Amino acid sequence: IHRREFVVTWSMVASVPLFRELDASAIAEIMRYLNAQSIPAGALIVRRGDIAQSMYFIAEGEVEVQLPTQVVRLGVGQFFGEMAILHQTPRTANVRALAPTKLLILQAYDLQTLIARNPVIGECIREVAAKRSELAPEE
Ligand code: CMP
C-alpha cells in the first residue's frame, strides 16, 4: 500500500490526550522518536499474527480494529498496536483505516525509553492494553 510520510508537528503530538500532561521538553523529546505516515482509506495497517515493531497514535482519521466477534472504532487521540509490544505476542487483530488517516508511529524500542522516562504514560498505556485484552473475545 501507498504510505506517505509527513512532518510531525507540535499540535499533532499535543492532540493525543496521553501526551497532554507533558511539559514542553518532554514533548520535544517525544517528537524526536515519532515518525508520521498518511494512510489511505481501506488500507490494512496492522495484520493479526504479525510480529510487532511499532505502535500507533491517531493524529487524524479513524481506524477499525477487527476482533473475532466485533469491530471497535478508534479515532483521533487514541492509539493501537501497543498490546503485541507490551505483552510480547503477535498482533492480536487486524487494524484497517476507515478514512484517510494520519498516524504517529513509535518504534517498540522507543516506547520502552518513553515509558522509562515518563512512568505515568507507561501506566496509562498498560491499563488500556489490559482492558483491551479483557474485552477481546477468546477463540
Ligand atoms: P496489537 O495486538 O499490537 O495489534 C492489534 C491492536 O488492536 C492491539 O494491539 C490493540 O491496540 C487493538 N485492540 C485489540 N483488542 C482491542 C479491543 N478490545 N479494543 C480496542 N482495541 C483493541
Image (cartoon, rainbow, N blue to C red):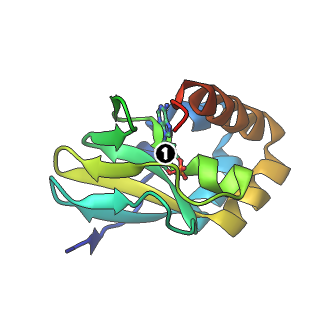
Which residue is the site of mark 1?
Answer: 80
Residue 132, by quadrant, is: top right
Give how far across and how far down residue 15 sits, in percent: 43, 36
Q: Position of residue 127 (x, y in %)?
A: 70, 29
- How far across and how far down the image is residue 108, in percent? 65, 64
Residue displayed at 34% across by 41% down: 66
Q: Residue at x 62, y 26 (%)?
A: 134
Which secondary structure lies at badge 1?
strand
Q: Amino acid at mark 1?
A: Phe
Q: Is residue 121 visible?
A: yes
Q: Residues within 10 Å of mark 1 (few under 14, many from 20)?
A: some
Residue 26 x, y percent position in the rendering: 70, 49
**Nearest to the observer: residue 103 or residue 89:** 89
Above/below status of 133 relative to 60 = above
- Identify whether 8 is placed above or below 21: below
Residue 22 can be seen, yes or no: no
In the image, taking residue 134 as reference, residue 34 lies left or right, namely: left
Q: Which residue is painted at 43% across and 35% down in the image?
A: 77
- Left/right placement of residue 44 relative to residue 46 reads left
